[in-house]
Amino acid sequence: MERTLKTALCILLVLAIHTPVWAQGSRKSADQDPTLTRILFVFDASNSMFGLWQSDRKINIAKRMMSELLDSIESTPNVEYALRIYGHQKSYPPQDCDDTRLEVSFGPSNVNKIKQKINQVVPKGTTPIARTLEACATDFPRCSHCRNIVVLITDGIEECSGDPCAVSRELQKNGIILKPFIIGVGRDFSADFECVGQYFDATSEKAFRTALNVVIAQALNSTTMQVNLLDQYEKPTETNVNMTFYDHYNGQIRYNFVHTMTTRGVPDTLVIDPLSIYDIVVHTLPPVRKDSIRLTPGKHTVIGIDAPQGYLALKVGGQDNLYKDLQCIVRKQGESTTLHVQGFREPEKYITGKYDLEVLTLPRLKIRDVEISQSKTTEVIIPVPGLAQITYPVKGFGSLYVDNGKTLEWIQNLNSNALQETLILQPGSYRIIFRSRFATRSFQTLEKEFMIKSGESLRIQITQ
């Protein structure tokens, strides 16, 4: 069993050390410098660790196991270690639920300090697991490029009325640590610790050895995944769009990847930290997402996300080179929220479906139920506008309206500080209502009706 426990911790550390990942909350990509992995060992030294188990007392097995383990990992690059012990300062009874202490802080070349401290420890007290996990939050110095991992070794459950599950969730939610590892020594504690982290049962050598063989095979390989962006035929043909990986627990950004196809025409392979659960947002228009994605360490995971897309091309009079600064508000069909403001310069990709458009001409053109189809380009062509060159006798106040015959539709207010302005207007009937700033009576209001034709320029003189 001694060898089994030692192997268990080795597996946990291989998982923590050899997976090429990036810091909690960091926005780095996988091509930057390796991140620093920080492993905090939380060691149970409560009085129950004096109990006999297999060939020796639990505390002696744990000491030998930790010593051999630390010898094997001492020279691992980009890793720092620390040690917190609980139940070793005050004898039980009476119960002291604050009996937890960081004995060795994080730093380079401190493995010998950790070994010495573990070898000196004498089990005495109680098991304040929740309080210990809370204290772990301050054990990790601030770092923008670190992965923080807790490995808890215990032969008992919470004895101080705390809630280790709630504390662990809060630590993960706040981005302080990744999901902890727990090794339960002596009997099955899975019901108590599965909500805390990834639990490893060490009740018998035979049962544990089978699990160890599987985990070792996985841990010695990088954990990879492939994201298939599926078209409407469920083929992974969509690509060239950014994907953001969020930590499911705390919402922090873990990765950004622009989806890429290899030279063989298949989605690229990503190397991902297997210790987190991810929510993936694909930044299509509109965005699509897939939540609660779990990876199995050492295995290649393939996930599919529905992202069928087509193109929308906007043109004026069928030409690509007219009014390049003109813009169009794009909304999902029947919705009021602006999805995108698209220009007339280049086609834009959208998720297949129907959209409502509002072209920012004068007046605005509303085009409903525009359908985007898979891998096709939908063209929307608006009429070529005309020019209205308006001259005023004096500066004044007024507005421009579309004349619908029975009603007037306000378009915009006129420039009250100008004697002349030029407006680009869609073909149609218009009316200007104007009053000099020097006029003292309402009946001195002036009106001017005019017609704009496609592609033509019209001079309009407002006279008193």
Image (cartoon, rainbow, N blue to C red):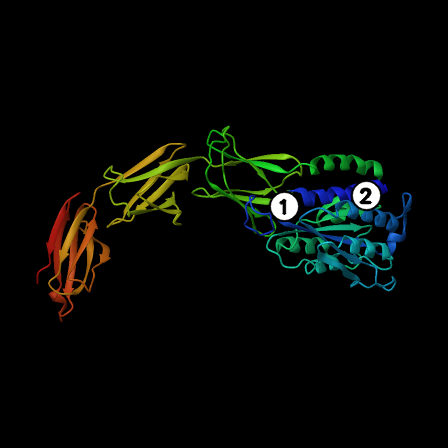
- The label on residue 5 is 2
Quarter assignment of residue 342: top left
Q: How many marks?
A: 2
Say what amino acid the circle numbered 1 marks: Ser
Identify which residue is drawn at 46% across, 34% down.
238
Residue at disc 2, secondary structure? helix
The answer to whether residue 142 of the structure is visible from this angle is yes
- The label on residue 389 is none
The residue that mark 1 highlights is: 276
Residue at disc 1, secondary structure? loop
Say what amino acid the circle numbered 2 marks: Leu
Give the quadrant of the N terminus: top right
Residue 419: x and y in percent read 15, 62
Identify which residue, 231 or 371, lies in the foreground.
231
The residues bearing labels 2 and 1 have C-alpha atoms spaced at a distance of 24 Å
456 lies left or right of 304: left
Residue positioned most to the left: 464
Residue 278: x and y in percent read 59, 44
Quarter assignment of residue 118: bottom right
Q: Which label's residue is closer to the chain start, 2 or 1?
A: 2
Residue 36: x and y in percent read 64, 50
Residue 128: x and y in percent read 78, 58
Identify which residue is drawn at 77% across, 44% down.
72
Other-residue count near label 2 (Cα within 10 Å), few / some / many at <14 / 14–19 / ≥20: many
18 lies left or right of 396: right
Identify which residue, 370 or 350, lies in the foreground.
350
Q: Nearer the viewer, mark 2 or mark 1?
A: 2
Give the quadrant of the C terminus: bottom left
Identify which residue is drawn at 40% across, 39% down.
350
Other-residue count near label 1 (Cα within 10 Å), few / some / many at <14 / 14–19 / ≥20: many
